[in-house]
Amino acid sequence: MNIFLAGSLWVVGAAGVGAVIGYLVRRFGWDEGRADNNDAAGQVFTIVGGLHAVLVAFVLISLYDSVGGATQDAQTEADSLVAATWAADALPADTADRVRQLAVSYAQTVEKEEWPRLADGGAIPATGWSQLDQMRKAVAAANVDGDWQIDRKTEASNQLWSVYQSRTQRLNNAGGGGVGAVVWFALILGSIITAILLPNLFGGTRLAAHIIIVSTLAGTITLLLFAIYQLQNPFSGGASIPPDAFTSALERLA
């Protein structure tokens, strides 16, 4: 389903539920003394709403930073792969050809085999690790002569280590599990209290105005929860980082 349509359904559904509850509370609830609750309910709403806003903001910012970090890690991994291949070009011809062949195969593996698994949470094949290890061994076994080749061999090894680190971080980003069950419990329960329970303790407004206030608050908080849900995995949902870095790397290695 389109993300904008899904988000709209979330918001409209929550606003509808909030409106119905607000109407039922005003229509059949206990009205006596409701207007006198405004001061006390307002103070509690300020504290609870503020705490909930801090929690939502913290989770959203953390997930947004994770998406940015995952994008940067993928770009670093692809750039380091190209840099390692270019450095290996100065090594003996058999080593240079072998490293380039493995680098192309590695980029294709990441783009075609690993990326779909990053999105759906499936098991990552070991092919990529094997190809990376073969590149490391090929560079380590290269017979070099002179300071230039020694320097290029060292540079190739360093860039492969950067590929290893970025790859590890990329896989961790996909397998991190997003928001934990405890945090989701706090987010959902806090949203119900903030958007449904406390606003219905206030009095003094007309029925129509009260319904609009409650439904708007419920829809807004649900929109934030939807954003959190979509950002849990940087490689799927609303974030959905594409494998453009490795597509570009393949073009440079061609």
Image (cartoon, grey):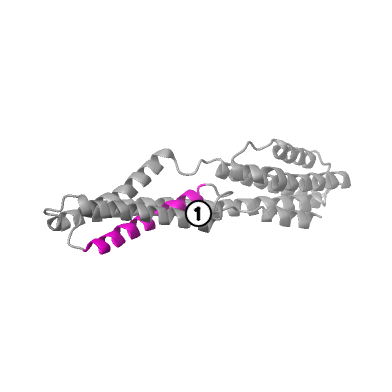
Q: Residue furthest right?
A: 93
Residue at the spot x=37%, y=41% of the render? 185
Local crowd at mark 1 within 10 Å, few (<14), some, or many (≥20)? few
Residue 58 in sight from this viewpoint: yes
Q: Is residue 19 left or right of residue 147?
A: left
From the viewer's perspective, tell me whether residue 165 is left or right of residue 207.
right
In percent of width and height, residue 50 lies at: 29, 55
Q: Magenta span has 247?
A: no
User: What is the total number of numbered labels drawn onto the structure image?
Assistant: 1
Q: Position of residue 165 (x, y in %)?
A: 62, 44
Which element carries disc 1, helix, strand or loop?
Answer: helix
The residue that label 1 is drawn on is 6
Instruction: Pick whichever, 80 or 65, lies toward us.
Output: 65
Q: Is residue 241 left or right of residue 18?
A: right
Q: Amino acid at mark 1?
A: Ala
Q: Position of residue 130 (x, y in %)?
A: 73, 36
Q: Is residue 231 visible?
A: no
Left/right of residue 254 with respect to residue 225 in the rendered view: right
Along the line of sight, which residue is nearer the eye, 32 or 160?
32
**Magenta part of the chain:** 206-232
Magenta stretch: dominant secondary structure: helix
Percent from the top left, x then y, of residue 224? Answer: 42, 55
